Amino acid sequence: MDLSPSHNAFSRLFLNSSAGLLIGLAAAMCLANCDNGGFTQPHDPVFGLSMSAFFWLVSLIEVTVGLMCLSRASEALKLFFVLWLAIAGVVYYMLALRHDQIELSMYLGNLADAFYLTPRLVYLGLNCIIVYLLTGSSAALFLVAAQSRANSKMERAAPTL
Amino acid sequence: MHSKNATSKSKANNVVGIGFNMRVAVWALLIVFGWRALALMAQSLNRPAIVSGLASVRQYAQDIVPNHANTCMVFCQETEEGVGIYYFDMALAAPRLLCELKEAAHRWQRFTMFDWTLDDKFFACAYPDARQNAEFILIFDGVTGILLDKVKVDDNLYQFGWLSDDRFAYSTRTTIQVVNRTPNGGWTYERSFENVAKAMDNFVPISSSAVAWRDENGIWLLDINSASPQRIWEATTNGLVEFTYSSSANRLSLNCNDDRGQYLLVADPGANQIWNAGRLGNQQDYIRNVVWSERGSGYAYLTNDLAGAAICAKTEEMDSPVTIPWHGGIRTITLNGDRIYFSGNAEDKPPGIWECDIRSGNFHSLLGAERHALRYTINSPSSSHVLTNSLGEERFYHIWLPPAASHIRKFPLLLGQELNTWFPWFQMAAHSGYCVAIVDRPFCHTWNGKHEHTWMEDVHSLYETMASNPDIDTNQVFLYGCSAETSYLSRFMEEYPNIAKGAVLFSPTILPDVRSLKNKHMLLVDGMADGDAPLRLAKYQDSAMLTGNKVAVYLEKGAGHNTASGSSERNRAMQVAAFLSEER
């Protein structure tokens, strides 16, 4: 699929930055898991996995999607996976927030301690990343779809020889 | 040609494109690893030296056992990996480790110092050997401290006494064994008395051929040459606390208690006569059990005073006991002639071993305390006060204020109930900016179920007293509780849900009902080997966090319900310091 130069630059920039964020976040989760300071990790409120196992699993998915963003796969596919990951994050939040009084930042103590941050700041950062991935991938996919429609119109309009 | 060029250009673009992307990934990793390194550095730089220092102070355990000449002693202190028994020649002032029990090998068996022979030639210790799954009595040379013999003993070894310089007896809860020294230097079993008691305690040798003990409320005497023991005294209305017996005078010295406190009785079992030797002190809740000297000729006990603590003692020559105030905390005391030995801390200095001359009332540091005094103090000694709790009972309490206390900002408050002994985290909390207020636990509040505990009343009254101080931030109140106290702490948090913002619980047995908690911050610390604690605390953490509470669970590897090594004590203290510092 051919994209116009500006669309191409936008989606490449977005995919590059997403790959960087996802790989960096995965590394951060792995580092936090490797040194939990002897503290027992709580279980995540949706799947009931220990936060340690949950971090391993999430970091594996993040690395996979991050590496996919660096691969030569089609841009639409890459964007689709980023969007899927972002939506999965949103769905996870919604499922977790079924518990009325829960404060999700408290589950991020391990990650916060490892990077000398407060859990609330880490929580805010993760929210920002999800919003970025969600809006960026949606916008890029929209542009890809629009470009694709434009291309097919042009192909139909072009005289056949 | 054109097509070939286009393909190679496209390949080059791809390589350049992937290369660029990979650089992004590498940069991301570099940023994360760099940040982590900076965080590690910041964490170590941000940890005050006083916290590491206080956490590293080795705690003393058990009673100090001096020899009869008051020239040497054995004492028990934490080592890095466990607890050790040390031989200490007072003239040399350099303790030597005799034996050590690693925390990981710690079971319920006794690891303790027993006693010296009358001529100070030998002393004995109880040592459980986990590898052999057996218990031993170790016999050491009294002059050199060298291990001479290991005598394998019955399981459940409990108490011990030298009958003479070459003969000893030991007891389990029901059995007595007599062991003799053989001419070639070994030790051999002489006699065994099975099932002579239901729950033997206070086992004391009273002559070279007789022992006495307490079983329930009676005192029993056994002549080793006879076949069966005889009851020589039975408490009917008096609660017997401790006793000793002088065979030469045929006199029983009894420490008893009733609703009004503790008192002494002297009994002549032969003549069936008993007379009251007087009440002990005037603070019924703050009288630690009497320790006897030379089978009743002298006695001493620990009591409270606005100075911090006080030792009350009477030697044979004295007509009445003297009270010697001590500015600080005391763990346990040992009376030997006209000297008292104890492990304790002077005001806010770290603990050491002290000697007190009863006649002059002077204290002399033998070990530990002075060496570290300047490094580990916050230079802000605690102050002692008295309050009356809601039951109308008097309680002593101690306040630690942050160094260079400022009145600009309100202090968070840490409340608890403890014995007045050395606890490094109170100083750490004060150093982190907390006002720490700890009410003294009455000495009679042991864990045998005989006394109603007043933790809730005491701590609530303490809170009310402290909350009236305008410098206290009543929105930042934290509670501290350890082991069985956590049941009272939990009830307190349930009954007064608006008082405490959080709590520190060591080895909790009972935890607050999560339904009554909202937005509380708690630190739970326990040993991995403390029964079902890992599972129980993890479950509690999950349920508490689902209801919006922040619960951190720290489990120490190799540790049980009580810490029994310098390293686990240090880890625990560091976690408390970090938690309180974060919550401030």
Image: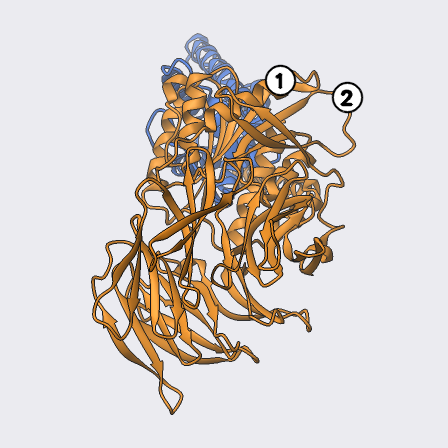
Chain colours: A blue, B orange
Residue picked out by circle 2: B407
Residues under numbered marks 2 and 1 in contact, where contact means CB atoms less than 8 Å apart: no
Tell me if residue B432 can be seen: yes
Label 2: chain letter: B
User: Which three-letter amino acid code belongs to the residue tagged 1?
Assistant: Ala
Alpha-carbon neighbours of circle 1 within 10 Å: few (<14), some, or many (≥20)?
Answer: some
Residue picked out by circle 1: B467
* Label 2 element class: loop
What's the residue at 45%, 22% (across, down)?
B493
Residue B246 point in image, percent of width and height:
43, 63
Q: Quadrant of the C terminus of chain A?
A: top left
Seen in the image, is A8 located left or right of residue B90?
A: left
Alpha-carbon neighbours of circle 2 within 10 Å: few (<14), some, or many (≥20)?
Answer: few
Marks 2/1: CA distance? 15 Å
Seen in the image, is B78 located left or right of residue B182?
A: right
Residue situated in front as seen by the camera: B22 or B441: B441
Q: Please, is residue B243 above or below residue B176 in the view?
A: above
Q: Please, is residue B319 above or below residue A117 in the view?
A: below
Residue B502 point in image, percent of width and height:
52, 25
Outermost residue, bottom direction? Answer: B184
Residue situated in front as seen by the camera: B5 or B156: B156
Specify the quadrant of the image occupied by residue B50.
top right
Seen in the image, is B582 located left or right of residue A101?
A: right
Q: Please, is residue B314 above or below residue B498 in the view?
A: below
Residue situated in front as seen by the camera: B258 or B523: B258
Q: Which mark is residue B56?
A: none
Q: Earlier in the sequence, mark 2 or mark 1?
A: 2
What's the residue at 54%, 31% (across, down)?
B416
Q: Nearer the viewer, mark 2 or mark 1?
A: 1
